[in-house]
Image (cartoon, rainbow, N blue to C red):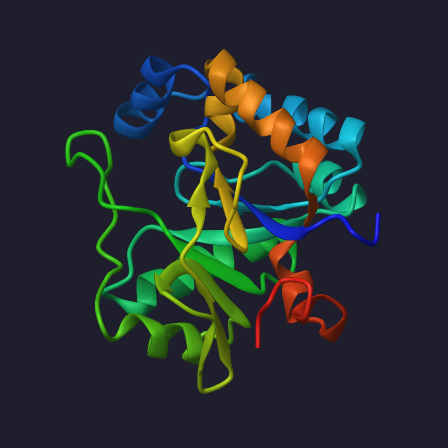
């Protein structure tokens, strides 16, 4: 395994259900049933079968994990991070962080939920200059959105470089340091599932927090 290339696996848990319709109802009308986020367990089983690890970034206002799901993720060696919705107001960021940490414990990493289509995505205002200073004030260790082309630092905050969005590109060759997968698409699309499993066979994946450990810096080509 020492010669297998290492990458960080980032899951942005944007949707509470695999179904687009059920997710839309959950966002707009507060609809939720017993299948809320149940598909994440299926993704965890896939990762287990390949002995791979990743970071699951949840949106506290829309895809907050249950305590049972939290235990399932952490006990298998994965990480939980914050997929932030509102970023222009640090008070709202702090509220989201508190909501997530009440369930997940200390959260070290943060990513931005993208703008998307306004009618479907009630968030995504994160791409502004004040954002990184807010991350520092809220004591995040790293920012994983890929806002810069190379790995860098902002005060004590580590900033990850641009990622490969595997479920859009569907190619496992020359994957960047961070590989982004939207887990609902793994179960929604056979093509995405096949690309995902091919990547799991080709690379060694670790949670994003591991990239901050000296053991992985050289293999991930981060400095």
Q: Residue furthest left?
A: 118
Q: Nearer the viewer, residue 148 or 123?
A: 148
Residue at the location (29% across, 46% down)? 114
The image shows residue 129, relative to residue 95, as above or below, that is below
The image shows residue 197, relative to residue 160, as above or below, that is above
Rendered-image quadrant of the C terminus: bottom right
Q: Nearer the viewer, residue 179 or 122?
A: 179
Residue at the location (23% across, 74% down)? 129
Q: State the image coordinates of residue 160 (x, y, percent, origin top left).
A: 47, 65
> Does residue 45 appear anywhere in the picture?
yes
The image shows residue 165, relative to residue 128, as above or below, that is above
> Does residue 59 appear anywhere in the picture?
no
Q: Quadrant of residue 102?
A: bottom right
Q: Does residue 176 appear left or right of residue 24 in this picture? A: right
Q: Residue furthest right?
A: 1
Residue at the location (71% across, 71% down)? 213
How many numbered badges does the structure rendering display?
A: 0
Q: Quadrant of residue 52?
A: top right
Residue at the location (69% across, 51% down)? 5
Q: Does residue 49 appear left or right of residue 218 in this picture? A: right
Q: State the image coordinates of residue 219 (x, y, percent, origin top left).
A: 69, 63
Q: State the image coordinates of residue 57 (x, y, percent, origin top left).
A: 51, 47
Q: Nearer the viewer, residue 21 or 143?
A: 143
Q: State the image coordinates of residue 177 (x, y, percent, origin top left).
A: 54, 56
Q: Does residue 222 appear left or right of residue 192 in this picture? A: right
């Amino acid at each position: 395994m020492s010669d297998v290339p290492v990458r960080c696996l980032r899951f942005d848990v944007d949707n509470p259900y695999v179904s687009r319709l059920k997710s839309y109802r959950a966002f707009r009308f507060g609809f939720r049933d017993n299948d809320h986020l149940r598909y994440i367990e299926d993704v965890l089983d896939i990762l287990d079968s390949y002995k791979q690890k990743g970071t699951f970034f949840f949106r506290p206002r829309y895809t907050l994990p249950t305590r049972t799901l939290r235990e399932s993720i952490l006990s298998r060696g994965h990480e939980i991070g914050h997929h932030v919705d509102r970023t222009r107001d640090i008070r709202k960021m702090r509220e989201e962080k508190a909501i997530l940490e009440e369930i997940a414990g200390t959260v070290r990493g943060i990513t931005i939920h993208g703008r998307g289509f306004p009618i479907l995505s009630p968030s995504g205002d994160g791409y502004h200059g004040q954002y990184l200073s807010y991350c520092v004030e809220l004591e995040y260790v790293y920012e994983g959105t890929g806002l810069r082309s190379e790995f860098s630092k902002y005060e004590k905050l580590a900033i990850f470089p641009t990622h490969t969005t595997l479920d859009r590109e569907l190619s496992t060759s020359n994957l960047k340091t961070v590989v982004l997968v939207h887990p609902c698409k793994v179960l929604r699309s056979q093509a995405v599932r096949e690309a995902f499993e091919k990547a799991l066979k080709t690379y060694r994946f670790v949670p994003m927090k591991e990239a901050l450990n000296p053991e992985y810096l050289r293999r991930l080509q981060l400095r």
